[in-house]
Amino acid sequence: MKFTLSWLKEHLETNSSLDEITNNLTEIGLEVEDIINPEKDLEDFIVGKILTSEKHPNADRLSVCKVDIGNEIKEVVCGAPNAKEGLLTIYAPLGSIIPKSKMVIQKTKIRDIVSYGMLCSGDELNIDNENEGIIEIKKAKAGDKASKALGDLDPIIEIAITPNRPDCLGVYGIARDLAAKGLGRLKVTKMNTLKSHEESIPVYTKSTKNNNFCNIFAGRLIEGIENKESPDWLKNRLEKIGLRNINAVVDITNFLTYDRGRPLHAYNSDLIAKDIGARLAKVGEKIKALDGKEYILDEETCVIADNEKVLGIAGIIGGEEFGSEIETKNIFLESAFFDPIHIARTGRKLNINSDARYRFERGTDPNFVLEGLDIATEMILDICGGKASKTSVALHEDFKNNKINFDIKLIEKISGIKISPKDIKKILLSLGFEIDKNFKITVPSWRPDVSLPIDIVEEVIRIYGLNNVESIPLKNSDQPSKPILTNSQKNTNLIRRNLASRGLIENISYSFVSSEFSDLSPKGRKPIQLLNPISEDLSDMRTSPLISLISNFRENKNRGFNDIGIYEIGPGFSGPKPGQQNSIAAGLRTGIYKSTGTERHWQGNEKADVFDVKSDVFSYLDLINISNDLFTHAIPGSDWYHPGRSANIISEKGEIMASFGEIHPKILSKLNIPSCVGFEIYLDEILKVINTQNDNKEFIFYNLQAVKRDFSFDIPINVNSSTLIDAINSCNIDLIDDIKLFDQFILENSKKSLAVEITIQPKKETLKDNEIDSICEKIIQAIEKATSGKLRSS
Amino acid sequence: MENLNSIKKEILQKIKSAESDGNVEEIRIRELGKKGRITKLLSELGKLDQEERKKLGPKINDLKNKVLKEIEEKKEFFLDQALNKKLLEEKVDVTLPVKSSQNTNGRIHPVSQVLDEITEIFGSLGYEIADGPDIETEYYNFNALNIPESHPARQMHDTFYFDEFDKDQGQSVLRTHTSPVQVRTMEEGEPPFRFISPGRTYRCDSDQTHTPMFHQIEGLSVDKETNLGHLKWTLETFLSSFFEIKNTKIQMRPSYFPFTEPSLEIDVLCDRSGPVLKIGEGSDWLEVAGAGMVHPNVLKSANIDPDIYQGFAFGFGLDRLAQLKYGIPDLRTFFSGDIRWLRHYGFSALDIPTLSRGLKK
């Protein structure tokens, strides 16, 4: 919302400075976003007279001007077509700051010619919207201060209005808030009721009890007007806040919109058949609106119509044919109250943004419909002449103000500040609230946002001043006697730092990816799509952070980084409902980014392989004490891994806790990336098997020396090493303390040799040779049976 | 006597001029071996009378010990010489680079690091961490937060939608803020509440300061007595700890959020005069958070009686806090996965922020 200082002062009698006003606006919740104060902004600028203007030798559209700035002559390169000899304009000296762009003027060489300063357009100076050429000044002489020569230097203030404050979408409402803050007195405009005996067009509203889309519809005929350009004061006012001047009638309705937050519409009454009012559209009815577009309407849209045709979309935009043109002689001026919810829905559905919609959907003052109509009528009669009829009004039901029973103790309870009842009353009264002796409060019609006692608290403290709130230490009533983090959060933190300590770099990527990537998801993991993605690249919810990592790898590879190790902990989505997401820690190693060394090195470097990512997964399982007997390998892993070089890790309950492997060559070739290895750890599943009880286990010393035995077996090449280990475990020998598989080599005729070291820890007494032999025999038999292998004779 | 002295002299001279370990061994055998000269002298002692023996015995023994010592020393000398020669041959170029250490190669993303820092601070104030889903229903994202369907604030949110509709809960959306977690968490527990909820949030918006995904962190404290004064203290305490500045000054301005009443925006004192923005000094204000007293309708949504309980809520941009604290200029770079950026702005796994250690690196 933009307005000028002088406009504000039309409604606010005040001696306050611009600074005081803007500081207070922000303090009461009308946040100042921008202040254009030409007097200050143009301090360094001076009037220059162009003495000579010659074409730039190296550029067709530029000219080189000698500019008299009073006490000296400057050479300036200028691109404006109107930079002609004799012109008085505004010169920006070196070091000055252009108000609009905030550019600092420096000595610059433009196509080999040095320019000492700049000649400015009105737009660049924030004076007007003219940007075709440099500004032309009349009564002034070279060397004058620009601020003096430009005359009208009304500061412009732009504030952000939160959606709860439709009353401040008019300058009058802003003045009221400032007056309540104590910055002056609100001027009350005295209205003479217009007297007329002329009949207007009959009006109607088809609001029903269940669907009150237009509670009041009013208007009057003004006939025999001479529509014209608006007078200068009006043109200026609208131009300063960035509105285009159209013609006096339209400008006046725009003025009322910004002055009083009261949208109006003026129809060419010659085109109205009979009766005018608000009704719901029939399905398929069409209207070509003022924005030049045709809209097809449905039965939920409220329209303004006569008994034949639609004239406009109520509260949003008028019909192109039926508006007021410069040659229009007779108009019907409409003022109505449209239901905010209705307008919001229609506006969104048709995707039309207008000043009217903006106000109606936030809530206009229902008690200002007729007064606003009168003010505008007077202005039209004043500027365009003509004769006004009586106002015709269709009212669905009387407006009832909100009433609130208020207990003033609530103010201290909520804010912690004590405010005297006298001050509370004063604030509320100045905002237009009425208070009876029992503190029953009547809310003014322009404040649809106030309906609860808590809303009154806000009104009082925002005007009283939030800077009066004092810090009060919060009692630490329940000092944490248990950890703050949940097990899930603790584990996420643990894996995050574990993976980073393994050389991997944490990424955080968008949760959505392009369909090119999401299509790579394994079968059964259908990517869900957004209905309104921000771009095609970000259309699908990822099923796993691994997808983001693969995508990030491609980006990095294109920048020349082939060897990277990255990870991300975040959601993978399985469906479009809340909760259909899994917390996944995914990682990717590419090129020679191994777990044991990540760069080219004189001691040698190899490509990262499946065992690097397996160790990423297992280092975490070890950390959280998920021992080998709590899971099994299922081979191969998910579809997006190489079927011969991947696995899923399955919990005892059969859930996948993790997967790892080489990324499937088909995916690599589709995305044109070199081979890489990845993993995913499903944190929600891990959490189910993790032992959260921290029993303190006693350490047991065994004084007897452990016995180590090595065995190697020749087994079929297709038998996994885990079969061998499982076989040892299945013997249930509790003296076995450790099993290490320390060697593998491939033999001929589809066999391989695996070697294990077994540590036997005697607990009570030293084992006799035959006891050890019997343990070994048991193990050998179990392995041979499970693997169809043979012990290698040494 | 002279004889013994000249023998000693002669032997020592020989040892001295020995050229190898073998030479020394030869001398040892010749003098101290079974048939050696000194061995012989010793064995001949027995043949002398007691008087002579007493006189000569110690002298010969002295001679023996002296020779033995000299031989051992000379032998050690040759051993050392040989070892040094061997060691020199084993020399490697120790200036060669070592493999870089994995825990310094790895990185923690600044957003994760900053979240850990924030967790430390709020943890010490008794706040728990609450999580919630990224995909929400319109009910939790809007209605339960006092944002009914046609509320203009819904438009300000630039919501992402899914083709999924539940007749009670409305359409599925990507949460536009972390506030739905407020209601979900309160629904499941009993007041009083004190928690923060960090997480990914999404809005259909993109420019230099907006990315379609970003992180928010929201805090909620609900009890019988919790007012704006407590809110102010909490935010001052948090900002002081986070930026490690004594007595951070904040300013509260009225604003509007449907789920709080009154609603405020929080500015922190800053200095923009230099090339680097400084928090906690100067005379400018920088907006850092939205806050307010929880709207009674939100408490009702979570089945909490607003006549008994009240509370405050606040929300920060997590990415923005990271930007401010660690001087990271462009929000978009956070999520681009650029390895160069991550190496530069990321943290080592071992930089675990704790209150006792300090929260900065």
Image (cartoon, coloured by chain):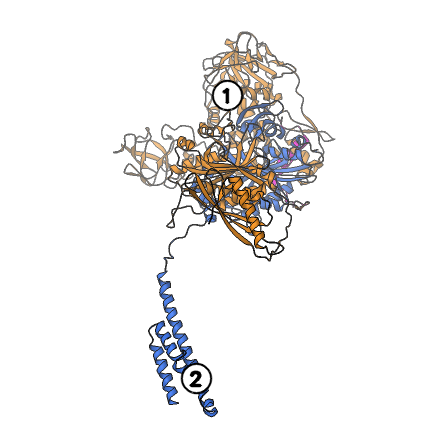
Chain colours: A orange, B blue
Image location of residue A482, percent across then percent down: 65, 45
Give the image location of residue A495, x and y in percent: 54, 43
Residue type at the position of mark 2: Leu
Q: Is residue B91 visible?
A: yes
Q: Chain of mark 1?
A: A
Q: Quadrant of residue B148?
A: top right
Query: For residue B42, which numbered disc appears in the image?
Result: 2
Q: Identify the chain of the residue marked 2, using the numbered disc in the image.
A: B
The answer to whether residue A262 is above or below residue B117 is above
Crowd class of label 1 (few under 14; some 14 to 19; many from 20; radius 10 Å): few
Secondary structure under the numbered disc 2 in the rendered image: helix
Identified by mark 1, the residue type is Ile
**Measured along the vertical axis of the image, is residue A64 above or below residue A220?**
below
Circle 1: element type: loop
Question: Between residues A10 and A570, which one lies in front from this camera angle?
Answer: A570
In the picture of the structure, the residue carrying the numbered disc 1 is: A352
Q: Is residue A257 left or right of residue B191?
A: left
Residue drawn at the location 55% of the way across and 9% of the way down: A306
What segment carries the magenta color? Answer: A447-476
Residue B248 seen in the figure = no
- Frontmost residue, A445 versus A205: A205
Depth check: give the residue in front, A389 or A426.
A426
Labels 2 and 1 share a subunit:
no
Of A451 and B342, the residue lying toward us: B342
A741 sits to left or right of B310 = left
Judge whether residue A456 is colored magenta. yes
Please tell me whether residue A16 belongs to the stretch shown in magenta. Answer: no
Residue B94 numbered tag: none
Residue A422 to residue A500: above or below:
above
